[in-house]
Amino acid sequence: MTEIIQNDTTALPALNALYTKAFPDEDLLPLLKRMIGEPDVISLVAGSLDNPMGHVCFAHGTVNGHRAALLGPLAVAPEHQKAGIGTALVQAGIEAVLAGGAEQVLVLGDPNYYGRFGFQQEDAVTPPYALPEGWASAWQSLSLDEELPSGTLELPDFWMDPALWSE
């Protein structure tokens, strides 16, 4: 069983190594540095802070005054993939943000992966920046309330970089 613990800034070097292995063509460390330890972020680690097997963040946001959360980034070390670590992290994070009052969780990711959790393509809530053509199915949400308003997802400053929303 994977232990899931709340993260802190001391884990940044190990998280950098994890994300470098999981995403060799992306540099997510600048985003992680800004997110880790922020009050608007839930950050969960599977394994230990000095040797994480997986990691996920959920950033709190709003849609027309309704509480929401953005899932991401999520990484699992290649040698630990397909072992349920990502699933455990996502499920624990969803439970935490919903228990904290979020009415909706949004993600920009693989529909086949996130669909397993109940995420569906989101058309009523738009991301902070226009997505590249062909990414519409990757913008998804999970909601407990069918009556949520439409609008634009508002997020903390660390997510307000157009490069994070483009190819």
Image (cartoon, rainbow, N blue to C red):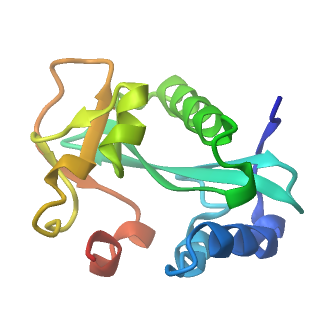
Q: Classify residue 27 by image quadrant.
A: bottom right
Answer above or below: position of 117 versus 34.
above
Along the horizontal axis of the image, is 151 left or right of 108?
A: left
Residue 86 at x, y = what percent? Answer: 61, 42
Residue 66 at x, y = what percent? Answer: 27, 35
The residue under the point 61% across, 66% down is 22
Residue 62 at x, y = what percent? Answer: 30, 45
The residue under the point 73% across, 50% down is 80
Where, quadrant-wise, is the N terminus in this rendering? top right
Where, quadrant-wise, is the C terminus in this rendering? bottom left
Q: Is residue 77 visible?
A: no
79 or 54, nearer to the observer: 79
Answer above or below: position of 129 versus 163.
above
Along the horizontal axis of the image, is 27 left or right of 132?
A: right
36 or 117, nearer to the observer: 117
The residue under the point 19% across, 68% down is 129
Q: Classify residue 16 by image quadrant.
A: bottom right
Q: Is residue 56 visible?
A: yes
The residue under the point 60% across, 51% down is 56
Query: Total label count?
Result: 0
